[in-house]
Amino acid sequence: MAVARMGPDERAEALASMAGGELDVLVVGGGIVGAGVALDAVTRGLSVGLIEARDFAAGTSSRSSKLIHGGLRYLEQLDFELVREALTERGLLLHRIAPHLVRPVPFLFPFTRHWERPYIGAGVALYDTLATTMGTARGLPHHRHLTRTGALRVFPALKRDALVGAVQYWDAQVDDARYVLTVLRTAAAYGARIASRVQAVGFLREGEHVTGARARDLETGRDVEIRAKQVVNAAGVWTDDIQEMVGGRGQIHVRASKGIHLVVPRDRIQASSGLILRTEKSVLFVIPWGRHWIVGTTDTEWDLDKAHPAASRSDIDYILDHVNHVLRVPLTRDDVEGVYAGLRPLLSGESDETSKLSREHTVAHPVPGLVLIAGGKYTTYRVMAKDAVDAVAHGLDGRIPESVTDRVPLVGADGYAALWNQRRRIAAEAGLHPSRVVHLLRRYGSMIHDVLAYMDDREDLKEPLTGADDYLRAEVVYAVEHEGARHLDDVLSRRTRVSFETWDRGIAVAEEAAALMAGPLGWSEEQVAREVEYYRKRIEAERAAQEQDSDNEADAVQHGAPDIVPEARVTAGRR
């Protein structure tokens, strides 16, 4: 398998290759579903290209609750098949596909009335039983019932009168943006051509048959034609927009549901477990996240700017009100380090409430040469991808092999267990604290040696970023040369999570990070300054939006922040 590198040179080569011949499959969309489709298709022996209009995982796939779970609440809706499918995928990701990225996490489910113990307890027992009978519960403790006193030992931050007892169970979590990137790098290692900042602006047609896409390189403004026997639309909440390019009424209709999350310091909530609470609309999670807690989410319809969904004051207050109902020491807005908002692509149904729309996925073949995939949930991305490529296979001549992605580890997985056991020796040899090596292993797995190699050449890259010291300077350079980062926001919002893990949302580290990116990207001092200024304005707009009372007001404020214009476009404009 080739080296999984996605730097500036590889992007240029991928785009030239896509424009120079005919692919079997062109994937439009670089979120988790598009990434999964690219990997599934290329590992079946197909020639594959993928284009993404912004950064990889820039939309929904970097703004989730960061959970890999079966969906406990779907049992109450009697959607046993969705839960079974998701639990199967959870087991595969934990133990075979991505053990370096997906890890177990405990949750406490408090009971507010005594009758809830048999009712909720039975649901959690069924949840564990489904996982056990499918052989996917290995490594996860079985649920356990707790008295009120026992629950308070696990979660001392709860009010004593907020519960009469609890059950503790286990699920899993992941850095969603990093997982998407790793799927893409795995696809690239098997031969897929992948390029970000390339927007599909139309389809190529031969009669009614779609034969590829017209695409615009947003970094240069140059248009290219990419020919493909089949095109897969994996655009998530943009599904309807892509369907409009082929004309007529689309077969899949997607509504966007906004979910926001708050990030607060770990010391503000005293607990050794996550927490799940029932709300009048859905559920609320308190999720451990390194030195922080992630608290969310909301579930409200959104029909405004899809690229930058805005969190309003009402959204933030909703989450604070609900979590403070059970916390002994309430959280305030001053405790909120970060906020992020994402959009779920839900299949439209007859219900007017987004919380009741389907989380299951669907595949359609509206015109020859075009496959649409939408809906679903992050945990089941691999199944969605398999179904999409199965549909692609119907449109291709010859027999296409069955999916093998349930047996294909992501890059960084092979050898991870041994390296984890050797983490102290690796730390000593690299001159790093063991906690730094743990951090790197959990982000890069067995690719850690690629990151450490940067530090062999430059001692300064061993140093943490000033103002974001959970991350090393080497990780910024690596993000550009191996992980496809093209702009400062790519690094601070997705390659790292500095944008919501620091009090200033990454403003203090922006200049240092941009300077580190400048070399491998060939930026001038002017472009470095522009990147920093763009990032500052984006953060200022997000913060201002969070002071507005309504979605419309928040969107109007946040929509005013400019998008970055690449240096090549600026230079061309001055000629």
Image (cartoon, rainbow, N blue to C red):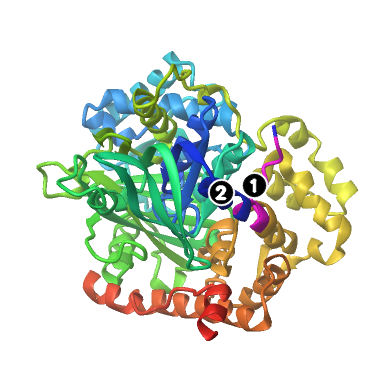
The quarter of the picture where the N terminus appears is top right
Give the Cα separation between the discs numbered 2 and 1: 7 Å
Proximity of marks 2 and 1: CB atoms separated by less than 8 Å: yes
Number of on-image labels: 2
Disc 2 residue crowd, few under 14, some 14–19, many 20+, Cα 10 Å: many
Tell me which residue sits at (11%, 49%) in the image.
Answer: 352
Q: Which residues are magenta?
A: 2-11
Q: Secondary structure at mark 2?
A: helix
Residue 187: image quadrant is top right
Residue 188 image point, x, y percent: 60, 40
Residue 388: image quadrant is top left
Whether 181 is drawn above or below 133: the answer is below
The quarter of the picture where the C terminus appears is bottom right
Magenta stretch: dominant SS? loop
Mark 2 sits on what residue? 178
Using residue 35 as the reference point, say whether residue 488 is left or right of it: right
- Give amino acid for label 1: Arg
Residue found at the very far top of the displayed protein = 133
Residue 443 badge: 1
Upstream in the sequence, badge 2 or badge 1? 2
Residue 410 image point, x, y percent: 60, 34
Residue found at the very far right of the displayed protein = 429
Q: Secondary structure at mark 1?
A: helix
Residue 158 image point, x, y percent: 40, 52
Disc 1 residue crowd, few under 14, some 14–19, many 20+, Cα 10 Å: many
Tell me which residue sits at (22%, 73%) in the image.
Answer: 552
Taking depth in this image into account, of 368 and 362 the one nearest to the observer is 368
